Amino acid sequence: MSDSFLRYTDLAAAIQLAKSHGMNTEQIIRALTGSMVYKDALRLAKRAAPLMDLSVQEFMHLRKNQL
């Protein structure tokens, strides 16, 4: 996902929409950062984590693909 796409997306609305469709926090984070490199995901985490009542560290931890 490129930065230009996120620049024109209302992040709060996207998160709210995902929650209203039954996605949990981990699913939302993975959907938002799925194809991002670490650096870009960290940049997004700084914007999105407060909207999800998470710390940046918690956001990045949930981003990890742990099965």
Image: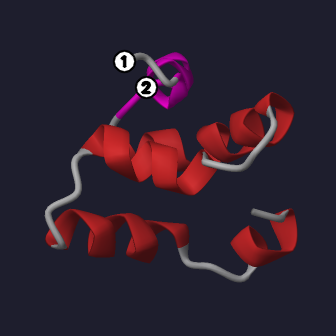
Residue named by callout 1: 67
Q: Residue at x 48, y 44 (%)?
A: 30
| Vertical position of residue 42 compared to residue 9: above or below | above
Please identify the dominant SS of the magenta region. helix
Residue 34 is covered by the magenta coloring? no
Q: Amino acid at mark 2?
A: Leu
Q: Amino acid at mark 1?
A: Leu
| Alpha carbon separation for disc pair 2 and 1 | 11 Å
The percent coordinates of residue 67 (x first, y second) are 36, 18
Q: Nearer the viewer, residue 54 or 26?
A: 26
Residue 62's label in the rendered image is 2
- Horizontally, is 27 left or right of 45 in the view? left
Task: Return the residue found at the far bottom.
Answer: 8
Q: Residue at x 41, y 76 (%)?
A: 13
Q: What span is in magenta? A: 54-64
The image quadrant of residue 14 is bottom left
Residue 52's label in the rendered image is none
The percent coordinates of residue 1 (x first, y second) are 75, 63
Q: Nearer the viewer, residue 36 or 3?
A: 36
Mark 2 or 1: in front is 1
Q: Earlier in the sequence, mark 2 or mark 1?
A: 2
Residue 61 is covered by the magenta coloring? yes
Q: Secondary structure at mark 2?
A: helix
Q: Residue at x 34, y 47 (%)?
A: 27
